[in-house]
């Protein structure tokens, strides 16, 4: 989750970079055809641990937060979850906010599994087709946007 549409589309990989620095980026075919943006308004303020500012530096996890290594992210998420579960349920946070790995300086959110049911039970959710959104139009006007790469050839079926 994110507090901005741009962070949401990059973090969810509706939009991805082309191979090689400076070679632009593209909207994935799936995102263009069936992607959606969901805007959620919860009925209360979220209680979140912050890994922004200098918090991740003080914890010694600043490099891990920015890592693209899936294992590192999984390990960190597991450890944060364990720390949250060690807190009395009435004081437990809803998740955590962390610096987006894709758009530096903006936050992304991770909502904890134990908070999802209660949070979404009374939330207002508005869903919009990504291809009809202002964010999509903004990206379409960017000269760095390219067409998605060619599809791989279909697999040859042999008997």
Image (tube, helix red, strand yellow):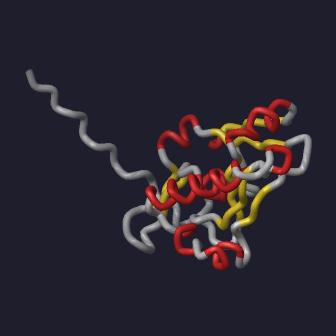
Residue 59 in picture, x, y percent from top left? 64, 74
Extreme residue in the right direction: 44
Residue 94 in picture, x, y percent from top left? 77, 48
Horizontal placement of 25 versus 91: left or right? left
> In the figure, residue 151 lies in which quadrant?
top left
Residue 153 in picture, x, y percent from top left? 24, 40
Horizontal placement of 68 versus 14: left or right? left
> In the figure, residue 121 lies in which quadrant?
top right
Q: Residue at x 66, y 53 (%)?
A: 8
Tell me how many marks there are. 0
In this rendering, is residue 58 above or below 126?
Answer: below
Q: Residue at x 76, y 60 (%)?
A: 49
Residue 5 showing in the rendered view: no
Q: Residue at x 58, y 57 (%)?
A: 79
In this rendering, is residue 101 above or below 86?
Answer: below
Extreme residue in the top direction: 159
In this rendering, is residue 19 above or below 59?
Answer: above
Closest to the observer, 90 or 128? 90
Closest to the observer, 36 or 58? 58
- Image quadrant in which the C terminus is located: top left
Q: Residue at x 63, y 42 (%)?
A: 131
Horizontal placement of 122 versus 39: left or right? right
Residue 42 in picture, x, y percent from top left? 86, 42
> In the figure, residue 56 lies in which quadrant?
bottom right
Closest to the observer, 97 or 34? 97
Closest to the observer, 103 or 47? 47
In this rendering, is residue 80 above or below 111?
Answer: below
Residue 87 showing in the rendered view: yes
């Amino acid at each position: 989750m994110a507090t901005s549409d741009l962070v949401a589309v990059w973090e969810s990989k509706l939009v991805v970079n082309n191979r090689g620095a400076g070679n632009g980026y593209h909207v994935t075919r799936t995102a263009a055809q069936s992607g959606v943006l969901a805007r959620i308004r919860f009925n209360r303020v979220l209680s979140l641990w912050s890994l922004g500012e200098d918090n991740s530096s003080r914890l010694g996890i600043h490099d891990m937060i920015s890592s693209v290594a899936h294992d590192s992210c999984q390990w960190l998420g597991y450890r944060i979850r364990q720390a949250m579960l060690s807190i009395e349920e009435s004081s437990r946070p809803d998740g955590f906010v962390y610096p987006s790995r894709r758009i530096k300086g903006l936050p992304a959110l991770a909502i904890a599994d134990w908070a999802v049911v209660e949070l979404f039970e009374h939330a207002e959710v508005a869903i919009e087709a990504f291809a009809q959104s202002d964010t999509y139009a903004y990206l379409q006007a960017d000269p760095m946007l390219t067409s998605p790469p060619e599809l791989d050839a279909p697999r040859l079926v042999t008997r």
